[in-house]
Image (cartoon, helix red, strand yellow):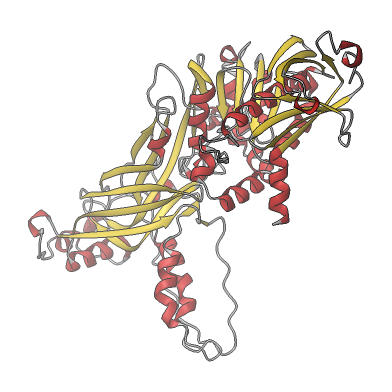
Amino acid sequence: MEIQKQCKQQQQQEEFALASVTELACSSTSSSRSDSKSAPVIARFSAGNGVAVLRFNRDSESTDSISVDVKTARLFKLGPLQSVCIAEASGADTGKEKYSTGVTVQFRNEEESRTFHCAFEQWKKKDIVQGTLLPNGAVTSFKSKFEDKIEPSSAKMYFHYYGQLLHQQNMMQDYVRTDGEGDNVNKIYASGTYYAAVMENRVDFIDRVVVDVGAGSGILSLFAAQAGAKHVYAVEASEMAEYARKLIAGNPSLGERITVIKGKVEEVELPEKADVLISEPMGTLLVNERMLESYVIARDRFLVPNGKMFPAVGSSCKVRSRIHMAPFSDEYLFVEIANKALFWQQQKYFGVDLTPLYGSAFGGYFSQPVVDAFDPRLLVAPAVSHHLDFTEIKEEDLYEIDIPLKFVASVGTRVHGLACWFDVLFNGSTVERWLTTAPGAPTTHWYQLRCVLSQPLYVMAGQEITGQLRMVAHNAQSYTIYLTLSGWFLSSHVCLSVFLICFLPFPTSYDKLLTAKMWGPGAEQGGILQTSSCKLDLKEPYYRMSQPQAYAMAQDQLPHQPIHTQDIHIQAADDLEGPELIQPPPQNLDGQL
């Protein structure tokens, strides 16, 4: 409760150190007030009783102050380091009528001037929305669009996570994202790096106003300044904003054109519109963390008509970002996940039978999407794509995403689930550059994502696989994934044949196996209809960066035989344009064997 009170108090006031303030009073009071506050002062914005007030004090503890009602005030620039604030102020404390008040403000540098002007516009809006008196006299509290759809605990963890330097370092060390000066030109092109995308398209940044959405450490703001941006507004809601200020101040030749604004893009106000938006709004499977919505909101609030967006904007190509999906076969992964639940099959765990929870544990492990980098040859069909255009998409379109699935299997095997990855376009005026997270491409910190079915499906080469991938946003800044795959698959006799063809090393007759009897509904289509579904939480993935460690067993625990997989021979293929697939069995199997 104490921490919440402190946070609330911080949100209710904001302080700035100024060089000096001089009050411009009417002639009747000029003799007593014209030279007041010419010494260094503190400017404090605060909210109370439904009104936002700006007070100028000699120090943070002083009670002698000049007060300005932000709602009626207007702030004008007189020069790079000087502004004047004019407002209607009340003289109720002295029994006088309302009179016009003017305050000349002197700043220590241009950065402080820009920051103060941004804060003034934000507090002016707060006075209109936050704490506004309703017709019935009640006072309402301001809740931004972000707060309306995201639960506070999730937002707190999210901003705490990205407020730490070690996580910023993790992203900055992802050289596929940021390194544009390496010797390997092919790697640079394949990676579609931010630095290369910005520097190769300087024409889009020179003398332009740029807004960095979710600026983090401010590295993209510095890139934009290097490219010649007139001014960059780095908007960051977490405590990382303070580190960004330090980093930018340590690069003064660039920092003089960058203003760091701490706040959410849904709430902050900027003194001018942006010609370019730059951001890294992508999460796992592109949409995790729901920052794409903030990116779209920033577009609607700050970007001039026909402005540029990095990533995903351009006039020549309507495809800005793509989510790719393909079925995969990975016996090792399936066995690894299934074996995790074997712990709960113990009947004598220190005298306790754990088996009642086995089913729940088994389902729980398969409800986690797997984040890792996999061999593209595990794919069993060419991928399909779902396109998103950041320049046109509406925020509400990201609340629920439905993607129909239709594949044609390239090989007979067991389908263990759906593999997903994404890429985005930096469509500059000079160079178009893609950033891809595809399997087989240089690995990024996004990796790839796989949804694993607890009931694999059997498929023969040439058979059609249909289904749906549905992603529904929830208030923990992520998505619930609903996956269904189905098709006219083979009956039990032919399923055994598929298993023998794919996994058994001894010679057999491929033709005889294919003539196994089929029966049941859909036999005329080549089998029976089988469907497998799963529900996964994108917020809680299984990060499979290394092989899991075996758990320690107590002396009275009964060891259980784990599920084993067959060794699967994957035939290599060279010079494929897209991701390689599992190779089908040879046409003349008897002769070759």
Q: Residue at x 65, y 16 (%)?
A: 229
Q: Quadrant of the C terminus?
A: bottom left
Residue 257 locus on image (x, y percent):
72, 18
Q: Work out whether 557 lies above or below 324.
A: below
Q: 114 and 526: which one is in front? A: 114
Looking at the image, residue 414 sits to the left or right of residue 514; the answer is right
Question: Quadrant location of the N terminus?
Answer: bottom right
- Up the image or down, 294 lies above or below 102; here it is below
- Residue 575 visible somewhere in the drawing: no
| Image coords of residue 327 (percent x, y) | 33, 50
Q: Which residue sits at x=19%, y=68%?
A: 492
Q: In the image, residue 489 lies at what x, y percent?
A: 19, 58
Front residue (pair 442, 21): 21
- One can see residue 475 in this view: yes
Task: Give the quarter of the image for residue 53.
Answer: top right
Q: Nearer the viewer, residue 237 or 352?
A: 237
The one of 504 and 103 positioned closer to us in this rendering: 103
